[in-house]
Amino acid sequence: MKHHYLLIFAFFILFASPILAQTEIHARVLDSTNKEPIAYATISYNNSTGVISNDVGQFQLQINTSLTAQDSLFFSCLGYESKQFPAHTFKDSIVYLKPKSIELKEVMLFNKNYTVDEIIDKVEDHLEKNYAVDYEKSTLFFRESYGSTILKKSVKIKASTIPEFNQELTDSIINDVPLESYHYTEVLGEFYKNRTDKDQDTINKLEILKASELYDKNNEMTFEAYEKKLNAIVQKHVKRDSYFKIKSGWFGTKQDIDSSFFQNESDQKTDDYIKAEQKKEEDRKKNFLKYRKRGINALEQISFVNEKSYLNCIHKSNRYEFELLDYSFLNDQYVYKIAFKPKRSEDYKGVLYINTNDFAVIRIDFKNVKSLKTFKLLGVGLDVYLKQGSLIYAKNNADTYSLKYAEIQGANKTSIDRPLKIIEKNKHVRGRRKQNELSADINFIVTNRYKREMVVFENEVLTASDFNTFKEKAKVEPIYLPTYDPEFWKGYNIIEPNKAIKDFKSMETEEE
């Protein structure tokens, strides 16, 4: 939806009249002392709906109701004094928050001299009360970012009985594979949660309202071109009813050849072909919905509230060491700032921010202390070396806590250094049935990075009937964007994109 400004005639009387227009606010939140950006600051409108600043303190807030003199913007962040501004006159591009200093006499007012272990015990005792909501609807914005970098790519042909499958063809394909690729997906939607069912991956529901995909389609076009070229070679040299035997070292797999290799253009005009294309379209929508829901579920399920979460520092507190670092301040509430680290084999360390009043964890920052998974066997290697993030919680309309913001990022490195042999055999040929053979040595090293971000604008507690009434439908396909378009999300609240997203341009855009 594009942003529209309405021309109005205003009357000024004793009180300011409503401003009947949509209002979009862009600004940056900085520390007033050192002018450093403040990440994860909460910016709310009338303390009801709002957004979170990104990692460099930037945010954008869309207000779709008429503003009056009574409407306010609230800025808050852990460790800082909150600030309030009249919404209808706010025009600042930078907002400075002042660090909140806590005096000893203030600490003594709320500190009951609990030990750090007693505080953690109380957090566990209050989990059900603080986070107990059976059914809930979250209006949210979800972004997934993926990037990969090829550090090494090599395929050496040792032998081939198909002349066209030679080193020259292989080198041309390998050289055209981009060393770096990026993919960004953004979704605005409503997420329906059912915490009474253990299988939340399937029971939860998602309605996608709008979505986009930002990536370089030119890379896909390159691979499409090579696919056509390879298909032509296969049609010329490979028989129908063939299958490939793929061997790499000691292992072998059988792969039947796809009959689409032998389709001609007239085949693609049949009713069956059209129906197949329509089914692909529906499948794309279903898969897009399924994988976005899986990503949002993953952010919900990593919570320390979940007993099976890898962030098990509360449910399995005996496996961790805790240290009370300091006291902090958020929204007129004091919090304990407690560090945790594993005693032995657990994977994560981090910091908990715990409300001193109700012992709710309102924020957790975490990072792995060692590689989470390493594998190396017969020339195949994997190292999952990074997983870190932050989860922030806020009160919902049932006066319990729900996830307000989540950011998770991770990285891994994969490597392949193996021989590869592809043997064509045919079902209707007697004897060993071998028709063609290709053997090569392959050597690839790739790093993969991902980041998932989610901000929840509103959490609404539902009844079981409300949850069951909503029927999930895959009806939205993401809009492809070859370059970042600031107009695409005009009129919507989102997470302010970082510099990498704003600067992204596909090759097709650069060539214009």
Image (cartoon, helix red, strand yellow):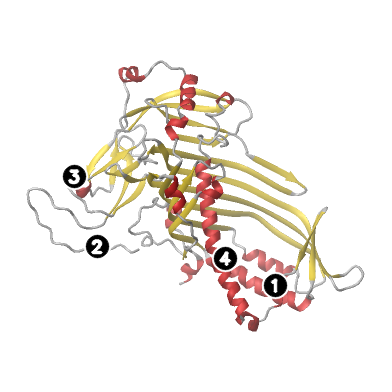
Q: Residues within 10 Å of mark 3 (few under 14, many from 20)?
A: few
The residue that disc 4 covers is 219
Measure the C-alpha gap from mark 4 to mark 2.
38 Å
Image point (32%, 24%), residue name: 102
Q: Position of residue 485 (x, y in %)?
A: 40, 62
Q: Which residue is mark 2?
A: 5
Classify 10 Å Cα crowding around label 2: few (below 14), some (14-19), many (20 and above).
Answer: few
Image quadrant containing the N terminus? bottom left
Dot 3 amino acid type:
Gln
User: Outermost residue toward the right?
Assistant: 431
Q: CA distance from mark 4 to mark 3?
A: 52 Å
Q: In this rendering, which labeled residue sits more in front, label 4 or label 3?
A: 3
Q: Position of residue 130 (x, y in %)?
A: 42, 32
* Mark positioned earlier in the residue sequence (1 or 2): 2
Real-space CA distance between mark 3 and mark 2, rounded to the nearest whole angstrom = 22 Å
Answer few, some or many: residues within 10 Å of disc 4's Cα (few below 14, many 20 plus, some between 14 and 19).
some
Secondary structure beneath dot 1 equals helix
Classify mark 1: residues with Cα within 10 Å, few (<14), some (14-19) or many (20+).
Answer: some
Q: Identify which amino acid the numbered label 4 is placed on.
A: Asn
- Residue occupying image coordinates x 73% and y 75%: 233
Is residue 450 at least partly visible in the picture? no
Foreground tag (1 vs 3) = 3
- Mark closer to the observer (1, 2): 2
Residue 263 shows which numbered tag? none
Q: Which residue is mark 1?
A: 230
**Is residue 142 positioned above or below 363 on the image?**
below
Q: At 47% across and 44% down in the image, what residue appears? A: 407
Three-letter amino acid code of the residue under disc 1: Leu
Q: Secondary structure at mark 2?
A: loop
* Residue placed under numbered mark 3 in the picture: 70
